[in-house]
Amino acid sequence: MKLKGRNKVSPDFSMSSMTDIVFLLLIFFMLTANSPNALDLLLPKAKGKSTNTQNVSVSIDKNLQYYVNDERINGEYIEIELKKALEGQDKPTIILRAEESVAIKEAVNVMAIANRNNYKVILAVRPN
């Protein structure tokens, strides 16, 4: 009569499932990593939290060059570009990134355009 146990546990360890999990996590973090802008702007400091709900990004650098979604445009045509970019949006939102040294009238100009067209404006800042 054999009384040997039938359920033997194998002492081998397979790394293939571990590497699959690592690659899935790597892909997940690469896809969810958020790089909001490629422009190197020095934003003003303020308290508050930012949101990632944006339809269009408008950036103004220290040389008064305007960018709509990282595409450089002439400041005179910013309203036309915004209308094109926000056409058909339910709640059109603009995130405004004005560099710290930019005169306030440049930012107010973009806010006035947004007000005329009923767009929501979020002013981007860097945390304190």
Image (cartoon, rainbow, N blue to C red):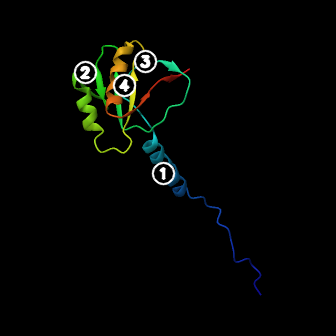
Q: Mark 1 or 3, which is nearer the eye?
A: 3
Which quadrant holds residue 3?
A: bottom right
**Crowd rating for badge 4 (residues with CA inside 10 Å; few <14, some 14–19, many 20+):** some
What residue sits 51% from the left and 19% below the top? 45
Q: CA distance from mark 4 to mark 2?
A: 13 Å
Query: Relative to 88, is 125 above or below?
Result: above
Tell me, for residue 111, which label it has, or none. 4
Q: Are marks 1 and 3 in contact (CB under 8 Å)?
A: no
Tag 2 residue: 75
Tell me, for residue 24, which label it has, or none. 1
Q: Residue extending furthest front? A: 116
Q: CA distance from mark 1 to mark 3?
A: 35 Å
Q: Are marks 2 and 3 in contact (CB under 8 Å)?
A: no
Which quadrant holds residue 57?
A: top left
From the viewer's perspective, tell me whether residue 51 is left or right of residue 119. Answer: right
Query: Relative to 13, is 90 above or below?
Result: above
Secondary structure of the residue carrying tag 4 is helix
Tag 3 residue: 42
Q: CA distance from mark 1 to mark 2?
A: 43 Å
Q: Mark 2 or 3, which is nearer the eye?
A: 2
Q: Nearer the viewer, residue 72 or 123?
A: 123
Q: Mark 4 or 3, which is nearer the eye?
A: 4
Looking at the picture, which amino acid does disc 1 mark?
Answer: Leu
